[in-house]
Amino acid sequence: MNRLKTTLTSGLIAVVALSGFALAEEWQPTKPINIIVPWGAGGSTDQVTRATAPILEEQLGQSVVVVNQGGASGAIGTREALESEKDGYTWTANAIANNANYSVTGLIEDTNIDDWHIYLSVANVPVVSVPANSEFNDFGELLAALKERGSEITVATAGITSSGGTAIATLSDEADFEYNMITYDGGNPAVVAAARGEAMMTTQLAVEQAEMIRGGRLKPLAVLSDRSLTIEGMDQPIPPVTNWLPDLPVAPDYFGIFIPRGVPDEVIATMDRIWEEHVMTSQKLQDYADRQGAIFDPSYGAEARARAMPIAIQEACAYVDRGEAVIDPVEIGIDCETRSEVSN
C-alpha cells in the first residue's frame, strides 16, 4: 500500500508539525529512552548516535540508552523499534536510505520512509581503502585489477544493504566488474578486518575508517563523491571517485535518529524543539563530524525527508537494476523509470 503523501499533504503536515512545535505540551519522560542501533558497536550509526545521545539526555532530563541490536543488515533492530509500543520510549537510528528501503529488499514487509519521524544529523560518504601494505596505490590500479581479476578481489563490508555493500555494488554496476564480498556484523568489524589484511579492500564509510586511516593501517584511494574529502590529521585529501568514473551516481547518505509514527504528539513537539535549538547548533557534533570525515548537516521533519529522498531513490533503483528487489519500489512511491518519487 502506498502511504506516501502528496506534495500538498506534506505541506499541510509541515504546518501542523510547526503548530505542534509551538503549542503541544512539553514532554517529560519518566523512564529511560532506548535508541536501538541495529548494527554493531563502533560503526557509523553507533558513533553518531552516541555523540548525539548526551545532547538529548541533557535536554530531556532522562537517560538515553543506546542499544546495539544487529543482524539482517539492520532489519532486526529496526523491526523491533517499528513494532514497539508507541509510547515514545523506543527509537532507532540508521542510515535513512535503509529505513526507506527495507521493504524493497524484503527484509521488513510493508514499510517505507513515512513510518518514521526523521531527525538527521550527518551525511556520510563511503571511502575505497586498502590495507597499508596493499599492492594498490591509487584507485585506477585497483579498478584495473577488479576488471581483470574480478572475484579474486575480496571486499570487507557490513552486508549487502550496508553503506559499504551498496557502495561496492554501485561501483561494480558502473565499471562492470565482479568482486567477492566478505560480510561482518557492522562497519567497524569490516574496517578492522580490512586493516588486518583479511580482505583486500573495504568500501565502508569514512567515519568508520578515519582512525585506521589516521593510524596508517588503511590506505584510502577514493571517496564516493564528486568532491575530495579531508579527514582531520591527514596530509592529503582523498580524491573523488569521479576522477576515474565521472558518470558514477553519488548522493549524500544521511544518518540520524528515527521515532516511529503513532507516538504522542508531545514527544515529537519536544524532539523538534530540542533538535532545532540544541542538536542543529551543537559544536560537539560539528567537531565529531570534522574529526571523522562526515558532513554536519542536521535537519528534521519535512526538510529532513526531502534531503533523504535522493539517496533513498538511488538505492531503491539500484536494487532493481541488480535484480535484488523483492517488490517494485513503486509500491513505496519510487518510480525507477524516472528515478523520481511518485504519490497518489
Image: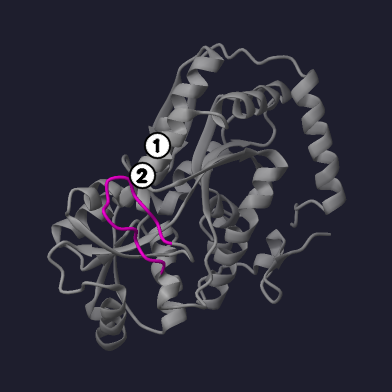
State yes or no: discs 1 and 2 in contact (Cβ < 8 Å).
yes
Q: Is residue 134 above or below residue 308?
A: below
Q: Is residue 284 above or below residue 45?
A: above
Residue 292, numbered label: 2
Q: Is residue 219 above or below residue 172?
A: above
- Front residue of 316 and 283: 283
Give the residue number, with chain letter if any, for mark 1: 288
Residue 122, numbered label: none
User: Residue 188, image x and y in percent?
Assistant: 29, 48
Q: Is residue 294 above or below residue 203?
A: above
Q: Amino acid at mark 2?
A: Gln
Asked whether residue 185 is in view, the answer is no
| Residue 129 relative to residue 306: left or right | left
The residue stretch that appears in magenta? 228-240
Asked whether residue 311 is in view, the answer is yes
User: Residue 65, image x and y in percent?
Assistant: 43, 24
- Quadrant location of the N terminus in the rendered image: bottom right
